Image (cartoon, grey):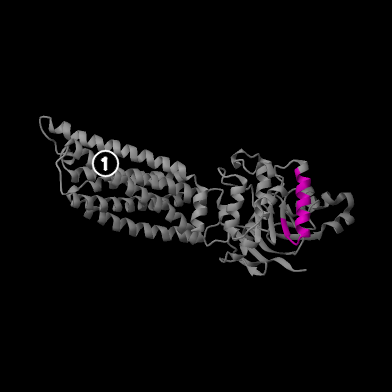
């Protein structure tokens, strides 16, 4: 399998606080990698470093074979939803996606992308009139419309109802079947368990445990969640 | 051109066009008022030193241009606050910096939009206001006439320089707003600059072109320096 993301001994500090310490992991083509960690574990920081939004103090990150640096070309092959997505709210969904495609220098079917996330009927409405769930869906549409090879999702299911969450999981699975790789972060174990192929537990600034969800669920059975919580709790001490 | 179009899509240009129309109407109203002040003072018992400003076209031009400089400088800072400060210091920064576009190039386009809108409309507005004032005064015989060609040349140059000065104030204020991470700081900085430098334009109405040219050179050098400081900051920016 082709390596899409290669994180090598990455370190990052904010002032005197070291948030990421010798963190290493890989994401392969067509898989959903779940990054689990408590609040403040450094999940968002890691994702931002992949997008070049945060400087890397030590180590290196390779995305799609290219080192993350001042060169921004690789970003056209990444889609992302970091924190709560923000928009130019006077625009409508169609205008926003068209603008996004122009920035990415790509062409794609806007109505098709809106249909995928269930927003086809709201494409002429100003985004300021959207609900939180609709904004989350639009954020996802913006992240996938240019057919990226890597999708970075930071707690993407926030604000979605159970039906929308199920639809979103189906969509993620469909995208990985088409060859897209997904990095998904969350602090909710159930959310990652039902979506990811592999999970990395980010604790104390590095990946303490990495496992295949299927294997670990078979091994732990109904105690899977307790096992993961135990891991995270132990690392907090 | 494409980047410029995309940046313009992000702002509601119509809001600023309405603001410009409002500024033009206000400047025109003040200009007409200045003409009437001369009439009232002329009919009075004597003339004060300040009234001298209203008694000839050089004085009127200096007053109107200073007023236009104040208005368009503040408007330039307001546009810069929206186009630059709110974008880089607000929540949109994450998506803005995730695009495969050179950060310096994007800032350059944003500064070009701020300067272009300010310079273009400041120039047109000042030319129109002075032009309407001159024609009105000619029709109603309100002011002593002067050499039209020389006056037109002075208005043309001073309006152009006023546009440059106003857009430079916008860019310089942006640096303060960037440092403080605040759109309000950008506008307050422009207000302070306007209070100080508007008076300089009226210091010597007879030499308005030279005074503004000197100011223009200094302001452009500072704005250029500020742009490079901003560009370096945005290049290394973390969100």
> Residue B109 versus residue B222: which sits nearer the camera?
B109
Magenta span has A65? no
Tag 1 subunit = B
Q: Quick check: A23 above or below A153?
A: below
> Residue A159 versus residue B29: which sits nearer the camera?
B29
Quadrant of the image occupied by residue A69:
bottom right
In the image, taking residue A129 as reference, residue B145 lies left or right, namely left
- Judging by the rendered image, the residue that carries numbered circle 1 is B132
Q: Position of residue A110 (x, y in %)?
A: 65, 51
Q: Residue furthest front?
A: B139
Q: Main secondary structure of the magenta part?
A: helix
In the image, taking residue B119 as reference, residue A35 lies left or right, namely right
Q: Name the residue: 16% across, 33% down.
A: B39
Q: Quick check: A128 above or below B110?
A: above
Q: Quick check: B28 above or below A79?
A: above
Quadrant of the image occupied by residue B42:
top left
Q: Name the residue: 52% across, 48% down.
A: B10
Q: Name the residue: 56% across, 50% down.
A: B92
Magenta span has A177? yes
> Residue B126 versus residue A47: which sits nearer the camera?
B126
> Residue B141 versus residue B21: which sits nearer the camera?
B141
Q: Is residue B37 visible?
A: yes
Q: Which residues are magenta?
A: A164-183
Q: Position of residue A168 (x, y in %)?
A: 75, 48
Q: Is residue B98 visible?
A: no
Q: Position of residue B169 (x, y in %)?
A: 36, 50
């Amino acid at each position: 399998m082709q390596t899409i993301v290669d994180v090598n001994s990455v370190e990052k500090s904010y002032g005197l606080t070291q948030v990421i310490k010798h963190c290493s992991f890989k994401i392969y083509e067509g898989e959903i990698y779940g990054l689990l960690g408590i609040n403040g574990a450094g999940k968002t920081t890691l994702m931002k470093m992949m997008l070049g939004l945060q400087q890397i103090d030590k180590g290196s990150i390779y995305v799609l074979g290219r080192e993350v640096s001042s060169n921004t070309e690789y970003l056209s092959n990444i889609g992302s939803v970091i924190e709560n997505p923000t928009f130019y709210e006077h625009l409508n969904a169609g205008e926003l996606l068209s603008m996004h495609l122009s920035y990415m220098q790509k062409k794609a079917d806007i109505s098709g992308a809106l249909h995928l996330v269930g927003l086809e009927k709201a494409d002429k409405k100003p985004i300021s009139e959207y609900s939180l769930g609709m904004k989350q869906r639009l954020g996802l549409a913006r992240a996938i419309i240019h057919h990226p090879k890597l999708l970075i999702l930071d707690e993407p299911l926030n604000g979605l109802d159970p039906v929308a969450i199920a639809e979103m999981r189906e969509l993620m699975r469909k995208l990985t079947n088409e060859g897209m790789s997904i990095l998904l972060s969350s602090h909710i174990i159930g959310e990652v368990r039902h979506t990811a192929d592999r999970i990395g537990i980010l604790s104390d600034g590095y990946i303490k445990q990495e496992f295949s969800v299927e294997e670990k669920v078979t091994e732990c059975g109904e105690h899977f969640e307790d096992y993961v919580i135990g891991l995270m709790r132990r690392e907090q001490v | 051109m494409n980047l410029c179009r995309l940046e313009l899509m992000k702002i509601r240009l119509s809001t600023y066009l309405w603001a410009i129309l409002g500024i033009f109407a206000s400047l025109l109203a003040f200009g007409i008022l200045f003409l009437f002040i001369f009439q009232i003072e002329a009919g009075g018992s004597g003339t004060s030193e300040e009234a001298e400003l209203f008694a000839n076209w050089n004085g009127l031009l200096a007053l109107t241009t200073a007023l236009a400089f104040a208005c368009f400088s503040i408007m330039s800072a307001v546009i810069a606050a929206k186009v630059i400060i709110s974008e880089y210091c607000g929540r949109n920064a994450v998506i803005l910096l995730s695009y495969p576009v050179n950060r310096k190039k994007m800032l350059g386009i944003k500064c070009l939009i701020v300067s272009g809108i300010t310079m273009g409309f400041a120039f047109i507005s000042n030319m129109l206001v002075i032009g309407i004032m001159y024609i009105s005064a000619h029709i109603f015989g309100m002011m002593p006439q002067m050499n039209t060609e020389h006056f037109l040349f002075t208005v043309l140059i001073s309006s152009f320089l006023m546009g440059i000065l106003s857009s430079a104030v916008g860019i310089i204020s942006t640096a303060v707003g960037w440092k403080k991470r605040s759109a309000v700081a950008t506008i307050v900085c422009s207000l302070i600059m306007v209070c100080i430098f508007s008076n300089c334009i009226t210091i010597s109405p007879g030499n308005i072109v030279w005074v503004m040219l000197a100011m223009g050179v200094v302001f452009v050098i500072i704005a250029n320096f500020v742009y490079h400081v901003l560009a370096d900051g945005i290049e290394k920016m973390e969100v």
